[in-house]
Image: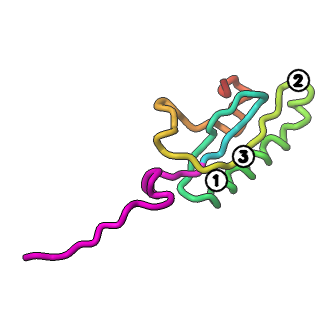
Amino acid sequence: MSEVVSLRPAQGPSLRGSPEDKIWAVIASVGKTSRIANIYASRDAALADRSWREQQVRAYATFLRSSQQPVPHYSVAPIRRADLPRKWSPLPALGFLRGEFA
């Protein structure tokens, strides 16, 4: 039962972990503080969540200005699952209004 198996050196992204390790994060930023709001397996799902969160913030724009609350900005970026903080939990779209951003 002898079989020849060719071994190839790892190249490109596989050096940084398996593809399953890569996830897409919606990142909320207020000033110099950033927090991962939610994570998704696909970029499209993360972009849809970012759009929904931006819509929620626009809906409350008048209230935010009148209460002098900083408005969060949302972005989407790929991250490794290992980079996720241990006690991470999803951030509600308007969680910053209840002090959940910090």
| Mark 3 Cα-neighbour bin, 10 Å: few <14, some 14–19, many ≥20 | some
Q: Under tag 3, what secondary structure?
A: strand
Task: State the residue at coordinates (78%, 46%).
Answer: 54
Q: Is residue 25 toward the left or the right of residue 75 in the image? A: left
Q: Can you identify the residue that label 1 sits on?
A: 46
Which residue is drawn at the image coordinates 35% and 66% (left, top)?
Answer: 8
Q: CA distance from mark 2 to mark 1?
A: 28 Å
Residue 68 tag number: 2
Give the alpha-carbon distance from disc 3 to disc 2, as whole Å.
Answer: 22 Å
**Which residue type does callout 1 highlight?**
Ala
| Quarter of the figure that contains the C terminus | top right
Residue 98 placement: quadrant: top right
Question: Measured from the top left, where is residue 43 in percent x and y?
Answer: 62, 58
Question: Residue 18 location in percent, x, y?
Answer: 43, 55
User: In this rendering, which labeled residue sits more in front, label 2 or label 1?
Assistant: 1
Q: Nearer the viewer, residue 57 or 70?
A: 70
N-terminal of the two: label 1 or label 3? 1
Q: Which mark is residue 75?
A: 3
* Mark 1 crowdedness (10 Å alpha carbons): few <14, some 14-19, many ≥20: many
Q: Amino acid at mark 3?
A: Ser
1, above or below 82, in the image:
below
- Disc 3 or 2, which lies upstream in sequence? 2
Q: Does residue 50 sit above or below 30 in this rendering?
A: below
Residue mark closest to the camera, 1 vs 3: 3
| Residue placed furthest toward the left | 1
Amino acid type of the residue tagged 2 in the rendering: Gln
Residue neighbourhood size for the residue with mark 2, other residues' Cα within 10 Å, grouped as few (<14), some (14–19), many (≥20): few
State which region is magenta: 1-24
